[in-house]
Image (cartoon, rainbow, N blue to C red):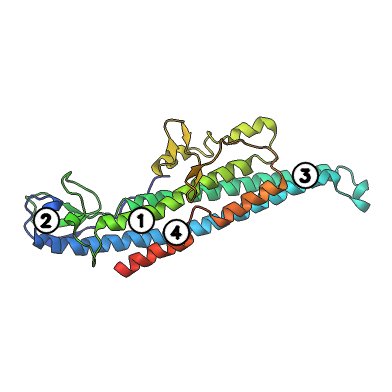
Amino acid sequence: MLMESPDKSSSSYQLQSPGWSSSTLPPSVTRLWRPAAQRNLRNQWSKLASYKSQWVSSSSAGRSHATSLVNTDLSLRYIPSMELGVLSDMLDLRKKASAKLLKQQELYRSKLLSSYRDLVAVLTHMVNTSRSMRCYVKGTSSSPLVQFSCSSEDKNDAGDGGGTPVFAFWSISSFEQLADELVLMFISELSLKRLLVVELFTISCEAREVNEFCWLNELYPGEFDDLRKCNLFSEDTGGPVSPRLMEGKSDMPPLKLNSQPNHENLQVYLTTWLEELNIDTHRHTRIFKIHEAEL
């Protein structure tokens, strides 16, 4: 899935436009740059808030599908030892029940994968938005108008107004640092969730199918291209970056897939998905409050 294009709307002002770099913007141009930069920052942070809500929705759906998948697997394990009582005389009852549960399991796998794809898409948009906070001077020195946009046309234009405070105190780079901190939480969390998806996909698989859900294999066509946009693909290993817990700053041990994780493992997987260990909720909320206070 492609990242969302930056907002291309621009503001035009009637002013002669000489050649300049962002570090030498004349005061008259800086006065025009600030309103355009303010509008862009409001737009981008509004998008981040919207994508955060989309993440919560997709993550909740994914957890629901994962729970259904686990419950179906546990039911399949229970069938062989199940006491049928008066139903024991019904032919092929266990076989038919197992076949139905296997179909349900396939459906829940598909839904879980769909939720994971939604999370990847949301994160891709977040990354794109965090990189779209600068406001560049648009046009040439011969143009009678000064325009501003999210895309750079001049390598000498850093898009930060020469470090000018956008609202009260903070420069563009300060807002970018906050956005990067926020997005990094979701990047780390997506990597961890991918590990859970891979592990959950292997439950009740035949031995020959386990390799289909290997960590180094794409879970859907084009997944690795999407992960590259989020800095979650390692060209050195030729696969996704291994998950880590942000607080401990330590990589996970080598990934070993288990085709039959036990009941305790499955409960840990579901709890880990729900808790979103790499997203510091208090810091997450604080970042948006800091941004709102500056505005």
Please give left or right for residue 203 compared with residue 144 in the image: right
Which residue is label 2 attached to? 25
Determine the residue positioned at 10% across, 50% down: 20
Gap in angstroms between the C-alphas marked 4 and 1: 12 Å
Label annotation for residue 30: none
**What is the quadrant of the N terminus in the image?**
top left
Determine the residue positioned at 57% across, 36% down: 255
Amino acid type of the residue that numbered disc 2 sits on in the rendered structure: Leu
Amino acid type of the residue that numbered disc 4 sits on in the rendered structure: Lys
**Of label 1 and label 2, which has the lower sequence position?**
2
Please give left or right for residue 172 compared with residue 117 in the image: left
Which residue is label 3 attached to? 77
Q: Secondary structure at mark 4?
A: helix
Determine the residue positioned at 80% across, 44% down: 96
Gap in angstroms between the C-alphas marked 3 and 2: 70 Å
CB contact under 8 Å: marks 4 and 1: no
Q: Secondary structure at mark 2?
A: loop
User: Residue 139 at what x, y percent from top left?
Assistant: 14, 50
Q: Secondary structure at mark 1?
A: helix
**Of label 3 and label 4, which has the lower sequence position?**
4
Q: Report which quarter residue 59 is drawn in.
A: bottom right
User: Residue 273 at what x, y percent from top left?
Assistant: 58, 52
